[in-house]
Amino acid sequence: MFEYQLDLSPDSKWVTITPHTASYNLPFFMTEVGIFYAGKDYFTERDEKNTYLLIYTCSGEGYLKYENNDYLLKQYTVVIIDCNKYHYYKSFSKEPWVFRWIHFGGMCAQTYMNLIMEAQYQAITIVDSLPFEAYHNNLMRVSSVSDTYSSVCTSTHLSNMLMHILSSKFNEKNNKNYIQHTQNINKVMLYISKNYMKEINIDDFAALIHLSKYYFLKIFKQYTGATPYEYLINYRINEAKVLLKTTHHSISSIALAVGFLNESNFIKQFKRITHLTPLNYRKTWC
């Protein structure tokens, strides 16, 4: 499906790009970019387009229907859409809806989409809009050239924009509980650093910060990118690396020292994370 009505002023700009061959091996590439001054009759409705779409509202307001939910796209907010899924967006204000947009893909596109829009899909208010808009201006400038250098520049500017969105997502403007959650996560991390050698579990963490286990798991993964168990195992492995490099203790004694109940599980987890056995790691270091 693809239907649209381009109620656009002459000030609008729309550039279509054929990515350079090298682009497909980079974290990001761009297929279209523009800035639209959209009148009241503007809309786009589609699905099954194999890109991601970033929409940033400069002024006016837009409306988005995506995954059976409705969103108001206010000034200085941004959304990212998986264009393979049904979406419909249109002007939603008396004055023109002015928005910057990018169709993009790349090896890291799905990962960033998940990081930015995980947990709760929302329109994110951009903090410090000037550099964000400058990245978009840079993309408009490099879009006219298709060579390796321009492809790398495009990937870099897109990466900067997406990192800016991530930074804004965790700002207090978009997350009222950010400070409290950060303090709680830091408290759990400190607890792990002092007790990793003991037998501890998720219930201990949740009780420490007085949250339900389900909610604790959700915010810990959201803020650290790992589950509490994954974070604990990684912490233990890092401590084991230090002992393997700086002592002559046996593998079994190091396993116990960092909190593993048996040597075989320690070896299994160490190899899974480092792709080396503890003994081979020690030999490689020495």
Image: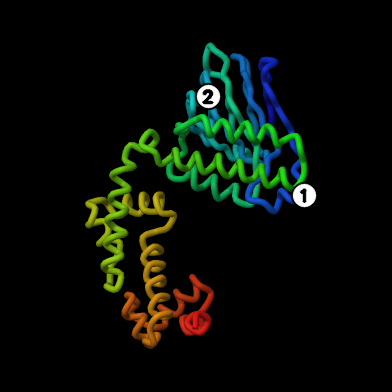
Q: Nearer the viewer, residue 78 or 50?
A: 78
Q: Nearer the viewer, residue 27 or 206?
A: 27
Asked if labels 1 and 2 touch by Cβ distance under 8 angstroms, the answer is no
How dense is the environment of label 2, judged by Cα within 10 Å: few (below 14), some, or many (20 and up)?
some
Whole-percent x, y for residue 11 in the image: 67, 17
Question: Does dot 2 land on a helix, a strand or a loop?
Answer: strand
Residue at position x 59%, y 14% in the image:
40
Q: Is residue 68 left or right of residue 172?
A: right
Pick whichever of labels 2 and 1 is earlier in the sequence.
1
How dense is the environment of label 1, judged by Cα within 10 Å: few (below 14), some, or many (20 and up)?
few
**Colour setup of the view:** rainbow
Question: Does dot 1 land on a helix, a strand or a loop?
Answer: helix
| Numbered badge on residue 71 | none
Residue at position x 30%, y 69% in the image:
196
Q: Is residue 152 left or right of residue 239?
A: right
Q: Quadrant of residue 159?
A: top right
Instruction: Say above or below: 117 vs 250.
Output: above
The N terminus lies in which quarter of the figure?
A: top right
How far, Cα to Cα, is label 2 from label 1? Answer: 35 Å
Frontmost of labels 2 and 1 is 1
Whole-percent x, y for residue 125 in the image: 45, 31
Residue pointed to by mark 1: 21
Residue at position x 26%, y 68% in the image:
195
Q: Nearer the viewer, residue 63 or 15?
A: 15
Disc 1 marks a residue whose amino acid type is Thr
| Numbered badge on residue 63 | 2
Whole-percent x, y for residue 253 in the image: 34, 85
Disc 2 marks a residue whose amino acid type is Tyr
Instruction: Say above or below: 256 vs 167.
Output: below
Instruction: Say above or below: 203 vs 1.
Output: below
Residue at position x 71%, y 45% in the image:
151
Q: Quadrant of residue 138?
A: top right
